[in-house]
Amino acid sequence: GENVEQHPSTLSVQEGDSAVIKCTYSDSASNYFPWYKQELGKRPQLIIDIRSNVGEKKDQRIAVTLNKTAKHFSLHITETQPEDSAVYFCAAILSGGYQKVTFGTGTKLQVIP
Amino acid sequence: EAQVTQNPRYLITVTGKKLTVTCSQNMNHEYMSWYRQDPGLGLRQIYYSMNVEVTDKGDVPEGYKVSRKEKRNFPLILESPSPNQTSLYFCASRGIFMNTEAFFGQGTRLTVV
């Protein structure tokens, strides 16, 4: 089955700086990679995703990059703000039939004002 | 409003006392899943359902049961809860053409003493 590793587990940045969270996956058949944000005490919410036929995707201050050869993908947050403080999860989706979602272990991001 | 509703939000129970956590969605989604979230382990899938009367085990099914008698409902049953099932539980749903978990419930914080 798929295995997703996520690093770092915690990350502190100054407001305005950039934050990068990295994930690696094991199964080359995975072809879809979403990212979730979970604020304290709340449910996970899908914030951005990338398909395996795309190398990079941006949405305002967040971007995701994918390196299929190396089997890793990253979340980049620029100009961080205190409201970006949350736990972020990456995930990898194995294609075919019911598409099982394998989540990373999460990164707790703290943006210091 | 599109939503996934879990109940209860918080539950403290004793070892061995059967309990049910309910999950209901109003989006006519085919797929529904249960996850547990533990510190440092991320979200791990317990069971999933592809449609009415179609369910299958996820990564950590031991000690849990589910049923899908109606499309909108997907209850999680703990026949004999144990302290190692103390966790935060999330129900999720998605439509058949969605690639990942799109909607999560509010979460159920379960403590087994």
Image (cartoon, grey):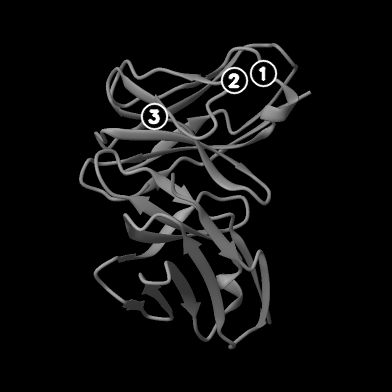
Chain identifier of the residue bearing label 3 in the image: B
- Residue at (31%, 27%) from the top-left corner? B72
- Residue at (62%, 56%) from the top-left corner? A40
Q: Are marks 3 and 2 on the same chain?
A: yes
- Residue at (30%, 19%) from the top-left corner? B70
Q: CA distance from mark 1 to mark 2?
A: 7 Å
**Three-letter amino acid code at the position of disc 2:** Gly
Reading the image, the residue beneath label 1 is B81
Disc 1 crowd, CA 10 A, few/some/many (<14, 14-19, 20+): many
Reading the image, the residue beneath label 3 is B24
Reading the image, the residue beneath label 2 is B63
Q: Are marks 1 and 2 on the same chain?
A: yes
Q: CA distance from mark 3 to mark 2?
A: 22 Å
In this picture, residue B112 sits left or right of residue A95: right
Where is residue B102 drawn, in percent x and y?
Answer: 35, 49
Q: Are marks 1 and 2 in contact (CB under 8 Å)?
A: yes
Q: CA distance from mark 3 to mark 1?
A: 22 Å
In this picture, residue A95 sits left or right of residue A82: left
